[in-house]
Image (cartoon, rainbow, N blue to C red):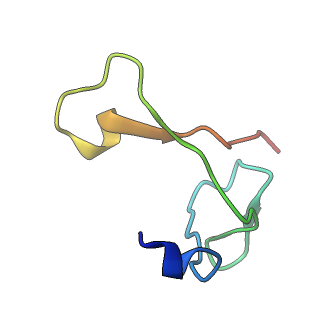
Amino acid sequence: MSRSNVGCQTIGCRVASCKYHSDGHICTLDRIEVEPMPGGNTGTPADESLCGSYRKC
């Protein structure tokens, strides 16, 4: 993402168990942290990263 897009993006999320999840699959945070999955490095998207900003409802 270029600097010109900062603050203009939306964050989609389907994780309904997160306290920041909103109707319409929207994340209500202004910013999220994406972190590497421990032991990932498989090349499979689901194994490579996770949302470090997740908080349980």
Q: Nearer the viewer, residue 2 or 35?
A: 2
Residue 14 position (above or below residue 5): above
Residue occupying image coordinates x 77% and y 39%: 56
Q: Position of residue 39 (x, y in %)?
A: 33, 16
Q: Quadrant of the N terminus?
A: bottom left
Residue 23: image quadrant is bottom right
* Count of picture labels: 0
Residue occupying image coordinates x 30% and y 24%: 40
**Residue 22 vs residue 57: left or right?**
left
Q: Position of residue 24 (x, y in %)?
A: 65, 79
**Residue 23 vs residue 40: left or right?**
right
View extreme (left): residue: 43
Residue 15: image quadrant is bottom right
Q: Nearer the viewer, residue 37 or 1?
A: 1
Q: Quadrant of the C terminus?
A: top right
View extreme (top): residue: 39
Q: Position of residue 26 (x, y in %)?
A: 65, 72
**Residue 45 vs residue 32: left or right?**
left
Q: Nearer the viewer, residue 6 or 19?
A: 6
